[in-house]
């Protein structure tokens, strides 16, 4: 079953459309569905990650040792430290306890000790490092401004992709949606559904910009969601957010945003939200640069219909930065948006076991991540520069899907030929949900019936009713009072 992501504009009831919105939506749907068909064809022949003989052997070993330890949990408390150490050595090597090794003595092994021993053995049985299982490069679409993106496309065909990436970083004008769930089960990249990399620019003296705004809004007008979490992380610029719960907020990477660069939005049972580019600029003659990631994070079925909530993140308390230097003073910097890295831990509490890390590495440096064993899913997207893993390169704008087992992710900031290079990349890792996935448009649920129910609830305005992005804040608030989401939560995160 092919999953098609439909632009948010197409989720509005027909009565809310105007001619400009219709035209812009048709353009978007043609572009995105064309890319979606290409990706579906490319993915149809194989899975992203396959179990290895090492992982199968590990599970057999785990089962044997677990039964040995559980069989050894007997009830006498007369054990001493020397005997305890002997047993610990036996368990760590995976040996089988016999009557002769007990010497007629009976020991009590606590449940905590048994679990720790199993985990230690499991960890030692894993391969030392994750490797690249698949490398992918998704299409980059021209938008905001379209003409920048089109020019960059043709120049990259002439002078190469690396030159095109440099132009995009400097001028903007493209967006790259990474559609992750390519199989019916959706488990290869679970719980991650999608990552989108935006890079745009808005110049006040651009006459074509003002023409474009007559039919293509600068941002994402009100649209519905249910059943997952959106994580919007701004590197440049920012957004103005309004929703059907009655919340208005600004966030981003500019001084006016107060360090709050990330929005963590749990869509829950249903809400509408609007994200319009915050193009305020004190230096009016300079273009406003916008760059961000948006990540769609699936949540367990039991959590999908909870009340929606919105939280802003940013700063040492919520998204700590960890800097590590080597003996040559080459540094790596890791911003922990979610999960943990070394002694840094994000404050947000996701509904499943995940980590989202933004890494920048100086040329020649090595970045190491002791990845949790439960994180069978690991994805790396290279924003700038190049990194290598076990000699295999991940060039700019490529997505690497990593093997499902291994104690560590090691990325060296080098080109494929071994010369030093900067490396700026995102790492997404997590424990698969192991649940069915049904995704259509802006809804992510477990079954097709639940998707149909989500759209029925939207059309009956249980999530709120769409509004025009041109409404003033007072007009928008009055609209929300008349048509609120019935799933409104009583408070928001700071």
Image (tube, rainbow, N blue to C red):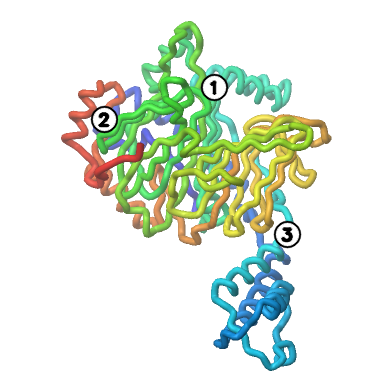
Label 1 Cα crowd, 10 Å radius (few <14 / some 14-19 / many 20+): many
Who comes first in sequence, dot 1 or dot 2? Answer: 1
Quadrant of residue 251 within the rendered picture:
top left
Per the image, the residue denoted by label 3 is 127
Comparing 63 with 113, the one in front is 113
* SS for dot 3: loop
* SS for dot 2: loop
- Position of 203 with respect to 9 (left or right) is right
Who comes first in sequence, dot 1 or dot 3? Answer: 3
Picture coordinates of residue 54, whole percent (x, y): 72, 65
* SS for dot 1: loop
Quadrant of residue 110 within the rendered picture:
bottom right
- Position of 450 with respect to 98 (left or right) is left
Q: CA distance from mark 1 to mark 2?
A: 27 Å
Q: CA distance from mark 3 to mark 2?
A: 53 Å
User: Residue 173 shows which numbered tag?
Assistant: 1
Comparing 483 with 368, the one in front is 368
Res 380 seen here: yes
- Position of 213 with respect to 51 (left or right) is left
Between tags 3 and 2, which lies in front? 3
Up-down: is 480 above or below 120? above
Up-down: is 235 above or below 138? above
Per the image, the residue denoted by label 2 is 467
């Amino acid at each position: 079953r092919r999953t098609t992501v439909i632009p948010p504009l197409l989720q509005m009831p027909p009565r809310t459309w105007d001619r400009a919105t219709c035209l812009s939506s048709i353009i978007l749907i043609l572009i995105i569905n064309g890319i979606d068909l290409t990706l579906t064809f490319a993915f149809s022949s194989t899975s992203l990650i396959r179990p290895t003989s090492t992982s199968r052997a590990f599970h057999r070993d785990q089962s044997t040792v677990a039964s040995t330890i559980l069989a050894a949990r007997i009830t006498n408390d007369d054990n001493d430290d020397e005997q305890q150490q002997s047993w610990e050595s036996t368990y760590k090597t995976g040996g089988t306890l016999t009557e002769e090794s007990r010497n007629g003595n009976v020991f009590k092994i606590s449940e905590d000790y048994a679990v720790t021993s199993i985990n230690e053995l499991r960890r030692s049985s894993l391969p030392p490092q994750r490797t690249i299982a698949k490398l992918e490069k998704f299409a980059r679409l021209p938008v905001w401004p379209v003409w920048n993106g089109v020019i960059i496309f043709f120049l990259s065909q002439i002078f190469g992709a690396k030159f095109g990436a440099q132009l995009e970083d400097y001028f903007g004008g493209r967006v790259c949606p990474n559609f992750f769930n390519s199989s019916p089960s959706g488990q290869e990249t679970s719980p991650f559904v999608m990552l989108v990399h935006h890079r745009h620019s808005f110049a006040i003296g651009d006459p074509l910009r003002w023409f474009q705004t007559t039919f293509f809004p600068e941002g994402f007008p009100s649209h519905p969601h249910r059943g997952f979490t959106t994580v919007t992380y701004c590197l440049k610029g920012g957004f103005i957010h309004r929703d059907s719960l009655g919340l208005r907020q600004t966030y981003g990477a500019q001084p006016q945003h107060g360090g709050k660069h990330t929005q963590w939005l749990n869509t829950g049972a249903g809400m509408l939200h609007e994200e319009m580019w915050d193009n305020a600029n004190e230096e009016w003659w300079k273009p406003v640069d916008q760059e961000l990631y948006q990540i769609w994070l699936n949540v367990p079925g039991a959590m999908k219909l909870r009340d929606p909530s919105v939280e802003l993140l940013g700063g040492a308390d919520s998204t700590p930065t960890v800097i590590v230097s080597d003996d040559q003073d080459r540094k790596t910097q890791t911003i922990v948006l979610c999960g943990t890295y070394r002694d840094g831990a994000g404050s947000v509490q996701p509904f499943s076991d995940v980590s989202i890390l933004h890494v920048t590495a100086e040329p020649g440096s090595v970045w190491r991540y002791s990845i949790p064993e439960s994180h069978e899913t690991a994805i790396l997207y290279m924003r700038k520069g190049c990194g290598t893993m076990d000699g295999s390169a991940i060039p700019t704008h490529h997505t690497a899907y990593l093997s499902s087992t291994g104690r560590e992710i090691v990325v060296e900031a080098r080109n494929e030929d071994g010369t030093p290079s900067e490396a700026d990349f995102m790492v997404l890792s997590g424990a698969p949900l192991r649940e069915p996935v049904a995704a259509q448009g802006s809804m992510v649920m477990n079954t097709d019936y639940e998707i149909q129910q989500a759209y029925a609830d939207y059309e009956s305005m249980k999530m709120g009713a769409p509004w025009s992005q041109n409404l003033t804040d007072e007009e928008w608030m009055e609209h929300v009072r008349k048509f609120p989401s019935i799933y409104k939560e009583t408070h928001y995160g700071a």
